[in-house]
Amino acid sequence: MVKRVLSYIQRTEVIQSASILVFGTLIAQSIPILLQPFLRRYFSPEDFGFYSVYISIIGILLVVSSLRYEQTIVLPKTDADAIQLVNISIFISLIFSILVLLIVLIFHSKFLQLLNIPYDKGFIIYLVPLGTFLLSIFQILNFWLIRKKRFKSISINKLSRRLVEGGAQSIFAFTKFSNGLVIGDIAGQLANGIVSFYQSFKSGYRLQLPLGLKVKQLLSEYILFPKISLIPAVMSATCYMMPVVFINKYYSAEQAGYFDLTKLILSVPLALIASSFSSVVLNKTSECYRNGKPFLNEIRPLIWIVVAISILEILLILFWSEFFFTLIFGEKWLPSGTMAKYLVFPFALNFITSSFTSVFVAINKIAWQSVWQLFYFMLIFLLPFLSGLSFENFILAYTAIEIVANVVMIVLLILVIGNVKAVYR
């Protein structure tokens, strides 16, 4: 039986590729996760709350930073066109980050008031443009490496970031520097950007200023990505990132810190596996679609794996979350364990959908995803109207909203994949 399973894996390219990415990502993401018991004892829930707000702002801006052109890198038939798209994306991201910096310099005080951030933590706003640009560089070059099937290189890039980030944050924890979480994150992103450039150059990429008629042609050819998917994508990122901002604003940084830990632990399958699966699905599906071949059988093994992992996560959290959180992170983090029992259901569903939403990009059906993102955005922005609820009821309302949104996404995925399958019959 074992030999048959191993033989099947060796014959199945999608599982081999996913295994490389999952293994590399597992090692990389294990570093910050394993450091959490240590960091959570040295940094307060408030420190993590403000750090989570910082990460959330960057996560939203990241979607806009290159106007979604980074997603087009896997689509051209020639590497020359793909390299042009890489350089276009980097240039747009640089201009965007400079504009964000100017806005921050002008409206710094207003942003602090709006986000409920005290002035002694106000420096994190100044780091947002830099953090956005560095993360954007990694994202852009990551798509180039996906195109070249350099999954091992992607894993190395992630590992470099986490090693530097974890090391820096640990040093700041020992020195009791409360702002060390954000500074450590910047250090990790810097290392990630440098290594990503190195890996990309090794795989044939060349950095150059995007000029000429070819650039205009490519911008026009893929204009649907910023035109149709940009605003809905911003909405989607906002939906994922904004709850912690709402909690910090309407409740407290301490509650935001508890929510941050719950989100971190429940997102372990997302962090360790979903992004890797999504990259492999994007590569395999786009390749099949370009060549006019069906792809459902190619990704079917991943579907079963993802569903099984989701069920396992739900069972583990329902029975042992509070014991686990207090044992690993300390008694002060018990509220995070209690919160996890509610949130595990939408996070498990989100793990399933996140693993396969790259299908929309691969088969150029981003309009479908855009409609869903608008629907999701409208649901999430009901939350400010519920801020008068107790914190527990607020979390229950958020849980219900997330479940509805992810169930609708699963239905859309089934419809899109079924439609493509029917065309290829």
Image (cartoon, rainbow, N blue to C red):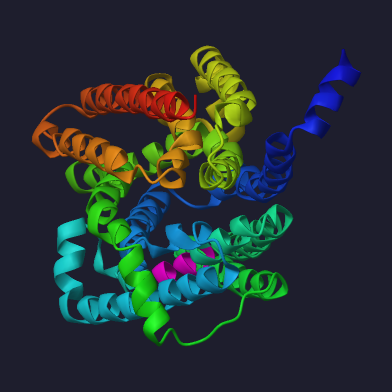
Toward the viewer: 113 or 188?
Answer: 188
Q: Residue furthest right?
A: 3
- Does residue 204 lie above or below 256 as drawn? below
Counting labels gives 0
Which residues make up the magenta segment?
130-138
Where 117 sits versus 295, above or below? Answer: below
Query: Can residue 87 be seen from the camera position used here?
Result: yes
Residue at left 52%, top 35%?
Answer: 265
Whether residue 177 appears in this view of the structure is: no
Residue 131 located within the stretch drawn in magenta: yes
Tell me where residue 370 sits by quadrant. Answer: top left
Relative horizontal placement of residue 410, taking residue 290 as reference (left or right): left
Of residues 49 and 348, the one drawn nearer to the viewer in this rendering: 348
Query: Is 309 placed left or right of 406 in the picture?
Result: right
Residue at coordinates 59% horizontally, 22% vertically from top-left? 309
Percent from the top left, x then y, of residue 170?
62, 59
Quarter residue 301 falls in: top right
Question: Which residue is nearer to you in this view: 7 or 259?
Answer: 7
| Residue 353 in which image quadrant | top left
Residue 7 percent across, percent down from the top left: 86, 26
Residue at far front of view: 425
Q: Position of 252 compared to 73: left or right?
A: left
| Residue at 55%, 27% in the rendered image | 296
Question: Does the segment drawn in magenta span residue 404?
Answer: no
The chief SS type of the magenta part is helix
- x and y percent of residue 226 in the render? 28, 60
Pick the quarter of the image with the N terminus: top right
Q: Position of residue 91 (x, y in %)?
A: 40, 79
